[in-house]
Image: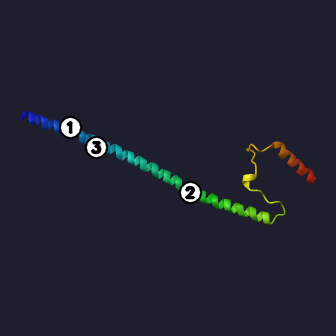
Amino acid sequence: MISNRESARRSRMRKQKHLDELWSQVVWLRNENRQLLDKLNSFSESRDRVVQENVLLKEQASELRQLVCDMQLHSSCLPLSPLEDVPSINSPHFESDSANQTITSSVDFLG
């Protein structure tokens, strides 16, 4: 009888320990869940801002394209080439000597 009581007490203690561990895990998981939801909300807000900015930039690009088209229609100058074909200063194909020659030729033409 004493042995049964002792065995039952140990069993209750094991169950209580297991229950305490489960509650500790619940607290940890709730905290982890809250942190992940905060991150998700932050990323969602950032995405929304980027989408709005993208829409604005597309509208501005369209307006600028239209402005360039209008300027080309009302100008006697040669049409501008697409941006992809224009070498930039940082481009490996950009040569300062040829740019200087073009500037010199333009000045000779004007002068």
**What's the amino acid at mark 3?**
Trp
Residue at position x 46%, y 51% from top? 40
Of callouts 3 and 2, the N-terminal one = 3
Residue at position x 73%, y 45% from top? 91
Residue that carries the numbered disc 1 in the rendered image: 14
Mark 2–mark 1 CB contact (< 8 Å) = no
Q: Is residue 36 left or right of residue 48?
A: left
Residue 97 percent location from the top left of the image: 84, 42
Judging depth in this view, the residue of 82 and 10 nearest the camera is: 82
Residue that carries the numbered disc 3 in the rendered image: 23
Q: Is residue 74 left or right of residue 14?
A: right
* Residue 96 image-quadrant placement: top right
Near mark 3 (Cα within 10 A), the count class, few <14, some 14-19 or many ≥20, is: few
Is residue 11 depicted above or below 50 in this figure?
above
Depth-wise, is mark 3 or mark 1 nearer the camera?
Answer: 1
**Quadrant assignment for the N terminus:** top left
Near mark 2 (Cα within 10 A), the count class, few <14, some 14-19 or many ≥20, is: few
**What's the amino acid at mark 2?**
Val
Residue 110 percent location from the top left of the image: 91, 54
Residue at position x 20%, y 37% from top? 14
- Dot 2 falls on a residue whose secondary structure is helix
Residue that carries the numbered disc 2 in the rendered image: 51
Judging depth in this view, the residue of 34 and 10 nearest the camera is: 10
